[in-house]
Amino acid sequence: MKNYIWITDDLENSLKQKEKVSNQLTVQLEYAIGHCKIALNKLREHVIEEGFPDKASEIYFFKKIKPGVYSKMLFYQAVFELESFRMIANKDSYKKHLDTEMDKITEYFEKNHVKVQYYQCNFEHLDEKYFIRSEPEIPVQLKNHFSLIDEAFFTWHDHTFSVIMAFYLLLEHICNELRSLNSGSELLLSEKKSQMHWTGSKVALVELIYALQGSGMIDHGNIGIKELANRFECLFNTDLKDYYRSWIEIKQRKIEPTKFIDLLQTVLRSRIDESGN
């Protein structure tokens, strides 16, 4: 295991040097992608040659170490694609493209919320099924997937964890990009800034936003979640850049899935009763 840690530490040191390679972001990204590939190849060589002393070591490797490296490569590749698009697009087209990419990531999180929850909560009860090679319960259709060509360096969900980790990094990058692109507009609107502040939890506000968007009562349902969240950010002087995480948290509730909406209903009924006396 010490060899694996040495490889990942060496990768981190190399990535810290990428800004010194060139002033061009695309060159820096190519440098980072290349070093991630080198690290993955070294990790594969050690796994093939040395194996693992026990199941716990194998699980740790495919749950933590390999996804930690692979996710970085996926992230840098995605940022390279975004940067390539930026170079040929105008500001509005780039913003629209970023919004589309964010929606794709949010949709992935929603479709794979069980695996996302497993990752977020660091569950362990399915580790032997998810992170041991040659797991007999892997569906046949997945065994035919191109990702499983190298079965000696692949488990059922180490790729899934890598994608989830990469998407979290990419979402942060996209939010920063959008914040930078919108900074000029925010300065123009600063004098009209709302004096109201949201004093409840952000999760509660996200619950309300999804309910309003789903009801179709704002712009006949044509407004997207991101745009609606941006409007509420301005209205209540709050930061909802992680609304997708709050939405996942809401979906994972076992008790009171609509807790805030239920509270509003209770408060309103109480007020109606009081005003009727």
Image (tube, rainbow, N blue to C red):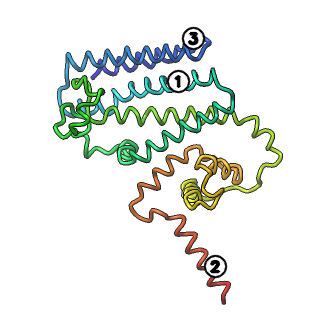
Which mark, by number, is residue 271?
Answer: 2
In the rendered image, the residue lying farthest to the right is: 191
Which is nearer the eye, 59 or 140? 140
**Is residue 106 toward the left or the right of residue 159 in the image?**
right
Question: Height in image: 138 above or below 68?
Answer: below
Secondary element type, mark 3? helix
**Is residue 16 toward the left or the right of residue 239 in the image?**
left
Q: What residue type is labelled 1?
A: Glu
Q: Which residue is rendered at x = 20% and y = 25% of the image?
A: 52
Q: Residues within 10 Å of mark 1 (few under 14, many from 20)?
A: few
Residue topped by disc 3: 20
Q: How crowded is mark 2: few (under 14 residues within 10 Å), some or many (20 or more)?
A: few
- The answer to which image quadrant residue 261 occupies is bottom right
Q: Which residue is rendered at x = 29% and y = 18% of the image?
A: 3
Q: Position of residue 133 (x, y in %)?
A: 21, 31
Which mark, by number, is residue 153?
Answer: none
Q: In which quarter of the image is the C terminus?
A: bottom right
Residue topped by disc 1: 81
